Amino acid sequence: MRIAVFPGSFDPITKGHVDIVERALPLFDKIIVAMGVNSEKRYFFDQSTRLNFLRATFQPYEKVEVDTYTQLTAFYCQEKGAGFLLRGLRNSIDFSYENTIANLNATIGDDLETVFLMADARYSCYSSTVVREIIKGGGDASIFLPASVAKLI
C-alpha cells in the first residue's frame, strides 16, 4: 500500500494545501494529513481548532486521514507505515529548504521518499503566514481558505 504523509502545522490550512492533496490522490492509496504539534511553538489557532479545520476540509475524501503527531516526522511516517512524504513547493526558496529536509528525512527515515508537487499558479502566493496576518488585521481571508474553514472562522 502506498501511504503518504502530508505534514504541516496548518495554521490555518489554505486552498493551496488542499490543492496539493487533491492532485496527489491518484498517486497514493492513502494520504495522511498530519498536523505536527510542537509544544515550543506558538500557534495562532489552537490545536483543537486546527484539527477541526482539517477534519471539516477532508471529511469528503475517502483516501484521506487526518491525524496529529509530536515526534520527528520521519519517525511518525515509520509508525504509520508511510513510505512517502508529500510536500508542496511554491518557489525556489521552498525548494532549497525542503530539499535539505528531504535529505535528512531520507537518512533518518530508512529511505523515506519525499514527493514534491509544484503549487498551482493560482495558489503560489498562498501561505498560512499571509492568511494569519490578514485575519489578525481584521481582513477577509476567505478567498484563501477552504469554504468549510472560512465558515468556522
Image: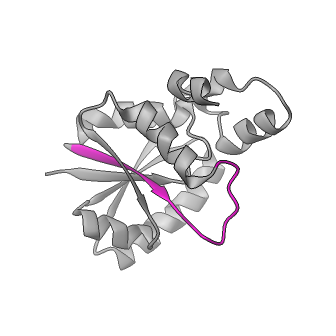
**Which residue sits at x=59%, y=29%?**
152
**Near-viewer residue (24 or 65):** 65
Q: Is residue 28 left or right of residue 118?
A: left
Q: Is residue 31 magenta?
A: yes
- On screen, residue 143 versus residue 60, left or right, reads right
Q: Is residue 54 above or below residue 47?
A: above
Q: For the C terminus, which image quadrant? A: top right
Percent coordinates x, y for residue 88 in the rendering: 49, 44
- The residue sitting at 53% across, 63% down in the picture is 37
The answer, for residue 118, to whether it is visible in the render is: no
Placement of 6 over or under 21, stated as above or below: below
Q: Does the magenta stretch include residue 19?
A: no
Residue lying furthest bottom? 108
Q: What segment carries the magenta color?
A: 30-45
**The one of 93 and 13 positioned closer to us in this rendering:** 13
Q: Residue at x 62, y 48 (%)?
A: 92
Given the current orientation, which residue lies at the most extreme right position? 137
Q: Quadrant of residue 28?
A: top left
Residue 115 is left or right of residue 119, and the answer is left
Q: Is residue 117 left or right of residue 147?
A: left
The x, y position of residue 141, in whole percent, is 71, 27
Q: To which quarter of the image does residue 130 belong?
A: top right
